[in-house]
Image: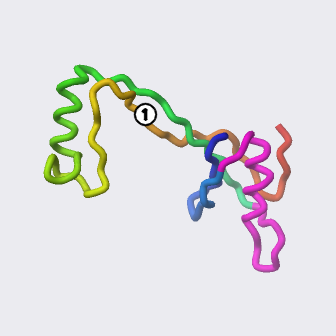
Amino acid sequence: MALYKLENLLRATESKEFDSDKQAWNSLRKTWKKEDGTISGVFITLWKEVKLVVPLNDEENYVEEHNSYYGPKPYGYGPDDAKLMKVGEPNIVSIWIPVLQGITDREYKV
């Protein structure tokens, strides 16, 4: 399951987990309603969160420098809830990619 959200320039939905793009579109588009309760027909983009493993160049030195700057106090200058990176652990990065563009009053029909 992956996280999905609908977003345009004015607002976005909360991200939710779905099994497929179709299921996400048909569910999330119904949250975009007019004042009378009907589904609003606006242009929108469906976004999906993808997690990637990004290799680190010169990992030992990178992790040490990263922790000294972004790590929690007293290691670095980061916030108290920051986590220390560890050598050997995969560096996982989450990104949002667009998977579908459409109008919210239309059902999934790709």
Image vertical order of residue 52 relative to residue 7, above or below: above
Percent x, y for residue 23? 78, 46
Q: Quadrant of residue 87?
A: top left
Asked whether 73 or 50 is in front, the reply is 73
Q: Quadrant of residue 110?
A: top right
Q: Label 1 sits on what residue type?
A: Ile
Q: How many marks?
A: 1
Image vertical order of residue 38 relative to residue 16, above or below: below
Looking at the image, residue 71 sits to the left or right of residue 30; the answer is left
Residue at 28 percent of width and 36 percent of height: 85
Residue at 27 percent of width and 41 percent of height: 84
Residue 73 within the magenta-colored segment of the rendering: no
Looking at the image, residue 35 sits to the left or right of residue 96; the answer is right
Q: Residue furthest bottom?
A: 36
Percent x, y for residue 37? 81, 75
Where does the magenta region start and end?
17-41
Q: Residues within 10 Å of mark 1 (few under 14, many from 20)?
A: few
Q: Residue furthest top?
A: 58
What residue is pinned by disc 1?
Answer: 92
Residue 25 within the magenta-colored segment of the rendering: yes
Percent x, y for residue 8? 60, 57
Element type at mark 1: strand
Looking at the image, residue 4 sits to the left or right of residue 91; the answer is right
